[in-house]
Amino acid sequence: MKHIPYFSIPAVLFVMACGIFLSFFPDKVEAQLALHHHWYSPRGYTWMGFITGWGEGPMFVLVIIAYALQKAWWRAGEFVVAGILSSLLVQLLKKLVFAPSPRPMGIIEWSQTQLATNLELPLQFAFPSGHTTTAFVFFTLIAIHWRRPAIQIFAAFCAIAVAVSRVYLMAHWITDVMAGAVLGMSIALVVSTVSQRIQKKPLTQG
């Protein structure tokens, strides 16, 4: 992480800020509703629905294709391996280790929220947040491959935005996205480190 300070510092500060916030609201339902009533709007919900898409598989496909066209096989391979590994680990944790792990709207009454009544939201398998994990895997690798400060900052912003969107959309608890952020960064760093050791040469800046 020391090689990508402009990414890692905002990412770590985000996780710490979440922890500090929860220290003031130890009850996760109270914490969720406090944020929801503070920031929710129909327009914001639409924007967050768009942002949450940054934590989905097609982002990996686009980058893998781009690297393949440049014949940057190692970088493409890192995204392939990290994507598969994150998917497997998230499903293992969601479905086996922490199941059923109810999501916010599996516990909170709809009448307590400002959400439209016709929305369909998942009610279980919350921990950890898959979208957040995917986003942090993706954008951590972007920061590692393209170490320019501006790209690192942009990557951190995007990853954090996905995490925030999952809470905003009432799809996840704050603890879910905290875990997803840590898990995603860890997977990306492990995959990148192993890849570099196999290649036996340092990364060159993009």
Image (cartoon, helix red, strand yellow):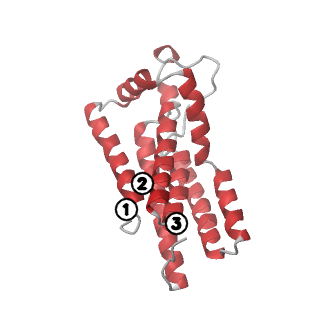
| Residue type, numbered disc 2 | Val
Q: Earlier in the sequence, mark 3 or mark 1?
A: 1
Above or below 72: residue 126: above
| Residue type, numbered disc 3 | Trp
Distance Cα–Cα, label 2 vs label 3: 21 Å
Q: In the image, what residue occupies the spot 65% across and 61% down?
A: 63
Image quadrant of residue 29? top left
Image quadrant of residue 8? bottom left
Picture coordinates of residue 9, whole percent (x, y): 35, 56
Q: In the image, what residue occupies the spot 37% across and 62% down?
A: 5
- Quarter occupied by the C terminus: bottom right
Picture coordinates of residue 184, whole percent (x, y): 48, 56
Are circles 3 and 1 on residues that touch, CB within 8 Å? no
Tag 1 residue? 5
Depth check: give the residue in front, 7 or 189. 7
Depth check: give the residue in front, 80 or 4. 4
Tag 2 residue? 182
Residue 146: numbered disc: 3
Residue 38: numbered disc: none
Q: What secondary structure is marked by label 1?
A: helix
Horizontally, is 83 left or right of 151 in the view? right
- Quarter occupied by the N terminus: bottom left
Above or below 44: residue 53: below
Picture coordinates of residue 21, whole percent (x, y): 30, 36
